[in-house]
């Protein structure tokens, strides 16, 4: 049964209302989620922002010990730098204005197919830009954790307005995964990556993109595999910068015997490093996300550093600015980080966990054409082509000498190059229905 709550400020702003028993709109930003796409502008409660800055200013620091930077997490000097910038220079409302100017944003609502009679509505925030090109290809861009829809920003103009007529152009749709950004988090269990795929396909159909291509990494790289498997008549091809195929028992035996290739060695060693040294965050969020969310919900700087610890380890030479670190963290902190964290637990229970040596094992084999892009600072790199083809019809493998996990942000030139090369070959990527007009 649907229910409605209303809490009004002196200015008369309704800050909380429920769409259903499953999703509740955040109390900290204005939003209206209807049954069809409606324009949206980011408008966060000023009192919440004031309190957030106050909380950041009151941060209690952890005492450093004599260990190398980043061994146990972000060192104190990183924390103090971000705290001081947040308190003395950062202006959320300037950032909010910039985001509203840069992105055409919308909201809408769906029910989860195949349950059209379900009372559980799924409210969704998304970015939608249409190219002026008549032969533009509809592209669904999918972010991951700890990213957001903002990851598309550095490649957006290049997708919409390529440098010449021979390069493909795209209509771009970039939704926020529920629980992240301005898509409200589920309020009961049962929403994981397959459900996200369901909703994102429904979004593309609602926008009259009956067929489309997909690009994504991290969570997005897993969702696109489910999209392709569950909606083969809609997804015509995709490019993944997170095509992680774990080694099987035979691979690991050959590795122990010194019989694996250089690429196989690099892949296994990278996954082992991630699994044993860098994935503590994943284990916590897969098992007891509420435990850590309690602290992160109360501490804006703690939340920012929780996210930053992965951000700093998975880039090549990219230097995150305090402005970026804070703004990225706000995409979780505004509605509360629990929803984004809990997605890891839901994903594990759905059988598509993020253990480095099992990730991808619950995903369907993909028959559509697949292009993969690999970057050296990511926790998967140099996956051999024969391994990659265990998960799908991989027709292109791009192995780069620079870049990392956040390809659209760190190396937009390389990712755009891969996108244009793949979908510029209409027959290889199966997009002839768009290019023929």
Image (cartoon, helix red, strand yellow):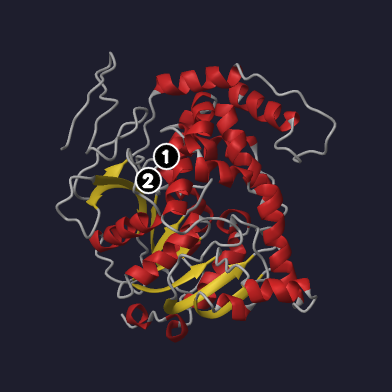
Q: Residue at x 62, y 20 (%)?
A: 59
In the figure, is residue 17 to the left or right of 433?
left
Element carrying mark 2: loop
Q: Residue at x 54, y 61 (%)?
A: 359
| Numbered disc in front, either 1 or 2 | 1
Q: Position of residue 238 (x, y in %)?
A: 45, 71
In the figure, is residue 253 to the left or right of 351?
right
Please indicate, yes or no, whether residue 138 appears anywhere in the rendered image: no
Q: Residue at x 49, y 38 (%)?
A: 289
Residue 328 numbered tag = none
Q: Position of residue 50 (x, y in %)?
A: 47, 19
Q: Position of residue 299 (x, y in %)?
A: 55, 25
Residue 178 numbered tag = 2
Quadrant containing the N terminus in the rendered view: top left
Classify mark 2: residues with Cα within 10 Å, few (<14), some (14-19) or many (20+): many
Q: Are marks 1 and 2 in contact (CB under 8 Å)?
A: yes
């Amino acid at each position: 049964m649907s229910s409605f709550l209303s809490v009004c400020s002196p200015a008369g702003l309704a800050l909380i209302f429920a769409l259903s028993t499953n999703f509740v709109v955040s109390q900290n930003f204005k939003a209206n989620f209807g049954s069809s796409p409606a324009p949206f502008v980011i408008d966060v409660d000023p009192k919440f922002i004031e309190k957030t800055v106050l909380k950041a200013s009151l941060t209690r620091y952890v005492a450093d010990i004599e260990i190398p930077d980043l061994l146990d997490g972000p060192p104190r000097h990183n924390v103090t730098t971000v705290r001081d910038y947040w308190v003395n220079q950062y202006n959320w409302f300037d950032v909010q204005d910039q985001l509203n100017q840069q992105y055409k944003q919308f909201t809408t609502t769906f029910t989860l197919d195949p349950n059209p009679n379900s009372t559980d509505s799924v409210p969704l925030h998304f970015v939608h830009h249409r190219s002026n090109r008549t032969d533009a290809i509809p592209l669904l861009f999918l972010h991951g954790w700890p990213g957001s829809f903002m990851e598309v920003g550095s490649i957006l103009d290049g997708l919409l307005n390529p440098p010449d007529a021979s390069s493909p152009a795209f209509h771009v749709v970039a939704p926020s995964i529920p629980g992240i950004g301005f898509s409200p988090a589920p309020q009961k269990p049962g929403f994981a990556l397959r459900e996200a795929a369901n909703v994102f396909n429904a979004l593309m159909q609602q926008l009259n993109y009956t067929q489309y291509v997909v690009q994504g990494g991290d969570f997005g790289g897993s969702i696109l595999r489910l999209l392709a498997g569950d909606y083969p008549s809609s997804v015509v091809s995709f490019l993944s910068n997170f095509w992680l195929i774990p080694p099987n028992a035979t691979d690991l035996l050959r590795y122990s015997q010194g019989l694996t290739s250089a690429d196989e060695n690099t892949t296994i060693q990278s996954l082992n490093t991630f699994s044993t040294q860098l994935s503590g965050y994943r284990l916590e969020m897969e098992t007891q996300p509420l435990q850590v969310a309690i602290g992160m919900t109360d501490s804006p700087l703690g939340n920012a550093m929780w996210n930053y610890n992965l951000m700093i380890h998975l880039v090549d030479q990219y230097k995150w600015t305090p402005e970026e670190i804070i703004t990225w963290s706000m995409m979780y902190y505004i509605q509360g980080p629990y929803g984004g964290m809990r997605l890891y637990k839901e994903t594990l229970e759905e059988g598509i966990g993020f253990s480095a040596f099992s990730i991808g094992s619950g995903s369907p084999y993909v028959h559509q054409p697949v292009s993969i892009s690999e970057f050296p600072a990511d926790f998967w790199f140099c996956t051999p082509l024969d391994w990659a083809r265990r998960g799908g019809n991989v027709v292109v493998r791009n192995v780069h000498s620079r870049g990392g996990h956040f390809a659209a942000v760190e190396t937009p030139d390389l990712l755009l190059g891969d996108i244009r090369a793949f979908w510029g070959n209409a027959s290889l990527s199966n997009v002839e229905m768009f290019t023929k007009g």
